[in-house]
């Protein structure tokens, strides 16, 4: 919601408006959904500035004007987090905008400076995660947190992904809810367009994992699951979609467990349409997060879970994301301990009972509908002072 301290600023309209979306990373998520929504709803200009996020990213800072189709690339060294300092200054020349959406405090701060210079009318701080000790017990964490606190108290409006992140951030910064109000916009999906899996997936069942290949994701358990299923006489293929620093070690583990013929590593898939097709070809989705009190997944709303739901996939996950219980109660998911045998039991129970698979499949599809990006943005942006045309939505782009 709009911060009362800045409620006097004039609202802006999407149709005919000019916007800057400043973000990091390349995976499909809120910044991509917002950018598409703004274009589809008739914005005059949508400039998207994308900075590198992880160490395996190329050092490319990309400026894309979506309405005109222009694209510029600025190359800088990429050694995060030290090179994050390049983000607010790359590029220095950007067009004036009615609203600036910043997807981390570094780029939101850039928007706030431009607001002071009268180059931007409204600044929205969109927090895509909350990490209590982002860079460990170090001066860098203290500087980052101080900057983030300034952004959430100075922006014209802000967004959190979950109630857990909202509460955690306020507690960490010593703020009351009325001092830093926020609109809660969870991760979503373009649910009407997402291809669904179907009963045919049970004929030659495949499991699927989607995500960044880092330790906290629990991906070794995916490989161990394939091994455990083979030990039980079940040769079930697994698609692992995503890149990351532990990819090589996972490939070595698959060879060691003698399941490298079953576990297929696709790496990072840039075209999310191809990701959706892989999901729609699977029978069961996996999210075996490591159970770790320091993991920021405890405060997150992981995007892959919404992608799984949109594809109609039964989900097997550990009790780490804050919405795990909700998914188990309403979306046909199972919450399990981080144990390959427990996951194997659940996989076999689902694959051997088509009626149970169908029940979970329909529950996932139905639960996903409330997380349609278009519906959520149409509802939430006006609360942030960004007016959306009340006429029927324009036909969305493919």
Image (cartoon, helix red, strand yellow):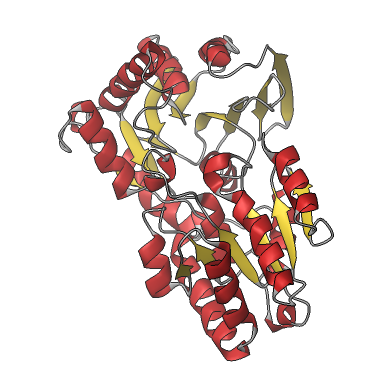
Q: Nearer the viewer, residue 106 or 344?
A: 344
Residue ID at (68%, 79%): 198
Residue 19, image x, y percentages = 51, 30
Name the side, left or right, on which 299 lies relative to 56. left
Which image quarter: residue 47?
top right
Name the side, left or right, on which 240 lies relative to 255. left
Image vertical order of residue 86 relative to residue 311, above or below: above
Which image quarter: residue 293?
top left
Image vertical order of residue 5 relative to residue 362, above or below: above
Q: Nearer the viewer, residue 4 or 196?
A: 196
Residue 239, image x, y percentages = 73, 58
Q: Nearer the viewer, residue 228 or 264?
A: 228
Q: Quadrant of the C terminus?
A: bottom right
Name the side, left or right, on which 283 lies relative to 94. right
Name the side, left or right, on which 332 lies relative to 313. left
Q: Decide if residue 265 is in sight here.
A: no
Which image quarter: residue 347?
bottom right
Q: Quadrant of the N terminus?
A: top left
Residue ID at (77%, 82%): 203
Image vertical order of residue 349 relative to residue 3, above or below: below
Residue ID at (39%, 43%): 387
Residue 373, image x, y percentages = 50, 54
Residue ID at (38%, 58%): 323
Q: How many marks?
A: 0
Q: Nearer the viewer, residue 51 or 101?
A: 51
Residue 177, image x, y percentages = 17, 38
């Amino acid at each position: 919601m709009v911060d009362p301290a800045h409620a006097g600023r004039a609202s802006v309209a999407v149709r005919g408006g000019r916007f800057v979306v400043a973000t990091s990373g390349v995976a499909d998520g809120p910044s991509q959904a917002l950018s598409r929504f703004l274009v589809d709803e008739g914005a005059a200009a949508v400039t998207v500035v994308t900075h590198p996020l992880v160490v395996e990213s190329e050092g490319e800072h990309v400026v894309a004007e979506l309405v005109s189709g222009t694209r510029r690339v600025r190359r800088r060294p990429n050694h995060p987090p030290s090179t994050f300092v390049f983000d607010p200054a790359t590029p220095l020349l950007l067009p004036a905008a009615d609203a600036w959406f910043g997807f981390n405090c570094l780029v939101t701060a850039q928007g706030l400076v431009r607001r002071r210079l009268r180059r931007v009318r409204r600044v929205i701080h969109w927090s895509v995660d909350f990490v209590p000790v982002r860079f460990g017990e170090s001066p860098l964490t203290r500087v980052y947190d101080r900057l983030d606190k300034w952004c959430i108290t100075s922006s014209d409006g802000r967004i959190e992904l979950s109630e857990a992140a909202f509460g955690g951030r306020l507690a960490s910064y010593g703020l009351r809810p009325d001092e830093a109000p926020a609109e809660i916009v969870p991760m979503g999906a373009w649910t009407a367009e997402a291809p669904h899996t179907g009963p045919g997936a049970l004929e030659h069942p495949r499991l699927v994992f989607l995500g960044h290949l880092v330790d906290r994701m629990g991906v070794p358990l995916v490989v161990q699951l394939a091994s455990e299923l083979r030990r039980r006489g079940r040769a079930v293929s697994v698609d692992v979609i995503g890149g990351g620093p532990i990819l090589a070690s996972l490939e070595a583990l698959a060879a060691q467990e003698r399941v490298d013929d079953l576990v297929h590593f696709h790496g990072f898939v840039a075209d999310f349409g191809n990701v959706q097709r892989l999901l729609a070809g699977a029978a069961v989705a996996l999210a075996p997060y490591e159970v770790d009190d320091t993991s920021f997944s405890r405060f997150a709303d992981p995007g892959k879970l919404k992608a799984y739901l949109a594809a109609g996939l039964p989900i097997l996950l550990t009790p780490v994301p804050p919405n795990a219980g909700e998914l188990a109660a309403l979306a046909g998911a199972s919450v399990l301990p981080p144990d390959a045998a427990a996951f194997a039991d659940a996989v076999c129970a689902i694959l051997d009972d088509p009626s149970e698979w169908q029940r979970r499949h329909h529950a996932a599809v139905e639960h996903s509908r409330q997380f349609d990006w278009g519906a959520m943005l149409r509802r939430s942006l006006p609360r942030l002072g960004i007016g959306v045309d009340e006429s029927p939505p324009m036909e969305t782009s493919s």
